[in-house]
Image (cartoon, rainbow, N blue to C red):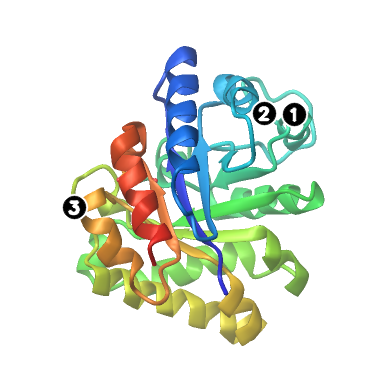
Amino acid sequence: MRTKIVAGNWKMNNNYEDSIKLAKDIESKAANLNLNNTRVIVAPTFVNLKGVKDSLGNASVEVVAQNMHQAKNGAYTGEISAEMLQSIGIKTVILGHSERRTYFNETDEALAEKINTVLENNMEAIFCFGEVLEDRKSDNHFNVVESQIKKALFHLKDADWKSIVLAYEPVWAIGTGETASPEQAQDMHAFIRNLVASKYGDAIADNVSILYGGSVKPSNAQEIFSKPDVDGGLIGGAALNVDDFMGIITAAANL
Ligand code: PGA
């Protein structure tokens, strides 16, 4: 059975105290839920990673990074390495978020290198991709997603896939309040799973968790997550409010 995941991407929000409070609130509320094998993840900004991690008492809420540099170390002012993350106990990193691609010019080629660094360090990647509105309107969305996945991931070996989580995030749905319909999400997730199967076979494709991201809220989570190829969500805005985030976690846990 595939692992269900609900991950909160806090982006550049929450100062130190707010981050710790939010994480602890999530942890205490999650303790009262039957998570039913759902992984609960939060991704604070770099400076708050260690504080949030240290403030949590057990492993029921995982703390992950929002980005990472591909190089081992060196003259990359302002960047963070895999080793640095690991030295504070961070094992998972979000890569390729559309905001990184758009505002910080992250290319598919750089992302392929970042994925390699994740694997060399025995870490896990939540790899994000998705089309912009023009691609969707011109019916080019499947081609765009295929190209993003092939360029960043199709050099992997079979065994590497146990360290990869996929996150389909149509750019037109991120932070806009506009969500892909459950059918649009399912169509794309099935396409992605078939694409992985075409190169790596059914067993690997069946095991990879594919998250949906883009304006997921408590009111739409259940319908989206109930689709067969949707294995949870990557949540932005609604992850900043404990009740909204718990509502989304509950929707995944109840499946
Ligand atoms: P959103 O963001 O939920 O605010 O649309 C999703 C994301 O960027 O991961």
Please identify the residue farthest to the front as the structure is shown: 32
Sequence-first tag of 1 and 3: 1
Closer to the observer: label 2 or label 1? 1
For the residue pair 252 and 34, the one nearer the viewer reads as: 34
Q: CA distance from mark 2 to mark 1?
A: 7 Å
Question: Which label number is shown at residue 80?
Answer: 2
Q: Amino acid at mark 1?
A: Met
Q: Position of residue 75 (x, y in %)?
A: 74, 23
Q: Position of residue 82 (x, y in %)?
A: 73, 37
Sequence-first tag of 2 and 3: 2
The answer to whether mark 2 and mark 3 are in CB contact below 8 A is: no
For the residue pair 79 and 192, the one nearer the viewer reads as: 192
Residue denoted by label 3: 178
Taking 10 as reference, is 96 left or right?
right
Q: Amino acid at mark 3?
A: Glu
Crowding at dot 1, Cα within 10 Å, few <14 / some 14-19 / many 20+, comes out as few
